[in-house]
Image (cartoon, rainbow, N blue to C red):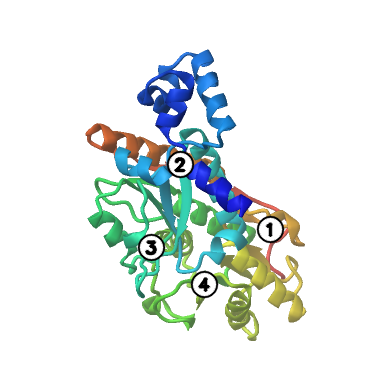
Amino acid sequence: MAQRAGGDVAARVTLQTIADRVGVSRMTVSNAFSKPDQLSASLRERILAAAQEVGYVGPDPTARALAKGTTGAVGIVLTSSLRFAFTDPVATSFLGAIAEQLGPTGLALTLLTSSDDGEVVPARDVAIDGALVYSCDPTSLAVQYLTRRRLPLVYIDQTPVDGIAAVNVDDRAGARAAAQHLIDLGHRRIGLLMSGVHGRHGLIGPEDVTVDGHASAQRLLGWRDALDAAGIVPLMARQDGSVLELAKAGARLLLDRPDRPTAILCFSDAVAYGALQVAEELGISVPAQLSVVGFDDSPLATQIRPALTTVRQDVVAKGRVAAEALNAAIEDTRAGRAVTAEHVVLPTELVVRDSTAPPPA
């Protein structure tokens, strides 16, 4: 009963209560919470002290959002599963950089799936001031919902479009460097281990390749730039997503055969880890009998043995640039200015470690 009574008392405390207590106007009290630069430091301290004495925590966030026409939150649209944000080391580093960059702005970060079926569709129904669209399935309706809402958007690892800011890494150049590294070592039997949701899975030929994302398309183009120039036709396997067991299934298709490749180019470090595990299970020595190259240079690359040759992308810089671009787009929108839709491409770098070597004689 005491807690309920206390709650009733706290609920009856308003801005006017604090104003009467301090001897100032209601607007002055409101400014102490929402526009502190409008008051002297001493006056604001008096107001906040009075509010604390009576248990007043400030204006109701919902009412304040309605009055200002903003939510104070931005969304980041991921894949259909939010688990990805907490288990993938590249995604966690990227999200951490975004959160750190948004911190001083006061904007909160809301994770949204790209799910577009069911009664609740996050991209359509969740109140946000803008959104980051991160490596989403291009067939999802989530982006269409966000566009119809006329929210400020930033694309990350998505195919750029006019009028929307985009942040990508140079996937094609990085993949080209990775393939050229194997060619320079002397490899001619090279496998590609790709991942994707749509299209055929398993062993595929050049005519069966379906790429359903910007990064996938660009990395495949980069690999083929170098391989085609060297006259090499790769053995290709494609699996559904980056889950370890699926990556291992794809790797086994490439390695459990008499004409197995002497090197594999992998879509990501997580996929490469699956290839290394399958090689160990089959008794194939890396790098003496098989070279493996990943992509991302995630923390996993230096934790596994042998340490992984991979392509480094600066996911922290990517997160910071994306957050800055979204904050700028939101400010432009609020001010009625045209949004600066810059397309940023960050560099990649081949990092050679212990998982690659010349092919066996």
Amino acid at pointer 2: Arg
Helix, strand or loop for disc 4: loop
Front residue (pair 309, 151)? 151
Q: Earlier in the sequence, mark 1 or mark 2?
A: 2
Callout in the foreground (3, 2):
2
Residue name at image x 44 percent, y 53 percent: 76
Task: Check disc 3: other Cα within 10 Å, few if <14, some if 14-19, many if 20+.
Answer: many
Residue name at image x 54 percent, y 26 percent: 50
Residue 12's label in the rendered image is 2
Q: Earlier in the sequence, mark 1 or mark 3?
A: 3
CA separation in Å, label 4 and label 2: 54 Å
Circles 3 and 2, Cβ within 8 Å, touching? The answer is no
CA separation in Å, label 1 and label 3: 31 Å
Circles 4 and 2, Cβ within 8 Å, touching? The answer is no
Residue 351 located left or right of residue 205? right
Task: Check disc 4: other Cα within 10 Å, few if <14, some if 14-19, many if 20+.
Answer: some
Query: Where does the N terminus fall, quadrant-wise?
Result: bottom right
Disc count in the image? 4
Q: Earlier in the sequence, mark 4 or mark 2?
A: 2
* Residue 270 seen by the camera: yes
Helix, strand or loop for disc 2: helix
Q: Position of residue 198 (x, y in %)?
A: 40, 76
CA separation in Å, label 4 and label 1: 17 Å
Q: Position of residue 303 (x, y in %)?
A: 74, 57
> Residue 142 sits in which quadrant?
bottom left
Which residue matches tag 3?
Answer: 122
Front residue (pair 4, 104)? 4
Front residue (pair 133, 52)? 52
Residue 241's label in the rendered image is 4
